[in-house]
Image: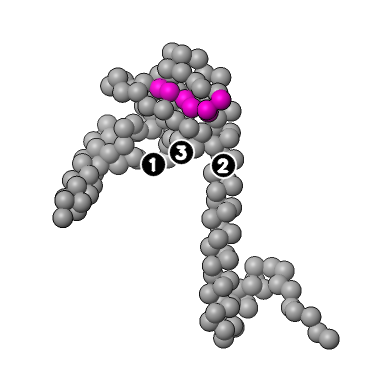
Amino acid sequence: MQGKKRYETVEDVLGWIAHSQDIRAVAEVEVAARDRRRLLQKREFDAEAAEAWDRVKGAKKGDTLYCHMRGVSLGGPWQRGDALIVDAVQPRKKLLWVSTARGEVWYFNPHGIARDDLRFEPPADAITPREREFADKAGQIVAEALSAESAR
C-alpha cells in the first residue's frame, strides 16, 4: 500500500500547486497558507509589542520618548523624530500615557508602542520639514475625501 506523498520543501509544495488540476484542493492550500501567514505575522507583532513594552515600562514622569516609526504618517499626530513626554506608566494595564508638544494627551498599549517604535533616544533620521508638510497635506486630502464619502 502506497502512502501519501510528503512535501518537505517549499519547492515541493509549489510544484504540486503548479501541476494540480483540483481547484478545490488548490483553494484549500491557498486558505491554509493565508491563515498561517496571518498567524505568523500576529506572533511576530506580539513579540515586537512585548519587546517594546519591556523597553519603556521603566519610564518615569517627565522622561522623553521619541517616535522612530518607519516611513511617514499621513495626517498622523506625530512623525519620526517627534518627542513625547511621559505622564504615567500603568504596569498592570500595560499603558503608557504621554503628552505632545501641542499639549495633547495620548496613551499607548504595547502594540501602539511597537507600531510607532517609541524609544528613549532620538532617531538619526528624523522627518524633514518638507516631508512633514507633505504628510500633513496628504492627510488633509484623505480626511476630506473620507468625510465627503461618508456624507453620501
Q: Is residue 116 magenta?
A: no
Q: Is residue 22 left or right of residue 98?
A: right
Residue 94 coordinates in the image, percent (x, y): 53, 28
The three-letter code of the residue at mark 1 reads Gly
The three-letter code of the residue at mark 2 reads Asp
Residue 36 coordinates in the image, percent (x, y): 58, 59
Q: Which mark is residue 21?
A: none
The answer to which image quadrant residue 52 occupies is top right
Q: Which mark is residue 46?
A: 2
How dense is the environment of label 3, judged by Cα within 10 Å: few (below 14), some, or many (20 and up)? Answer: some
Q: Are marks 1 and 2 in contact (CB under 8 Å)?
A: no
Residue 86 coordinates in the image, percent (x, y): 43, 19
How dense is the environment of label 1, judged by Cα within 10 Å: few (below 14), some, or many (20 and up)? Answer: few
The answer to which image quadrant residue 100 occupies is top left
Q: Which mark is residue 115?
A: 3
Report, in whole angstroms, how far the alpha carbon at label 3 lies from the one at label 1. Answer: 11 Å
Residue 37 coordinates in the image, percent (x, y): 56, 58
Q: Are marks 2 and 3 in contact (CB under 8 Å)?
A: no
Q: Residue at x 62, y 77 (%)?
A: 15
Who is closer to the viewer here, 43 or 11? 43
The three-letter code of the residue at mark 3 reads Arg
Who is closer to the viewer here, 14 or 91? 91
How dense is the environment of label 2, judged by Cα within 10 Å: few (below 14), some, or many (20 and up)? Answer: some
Mark 1 = which residue?
71
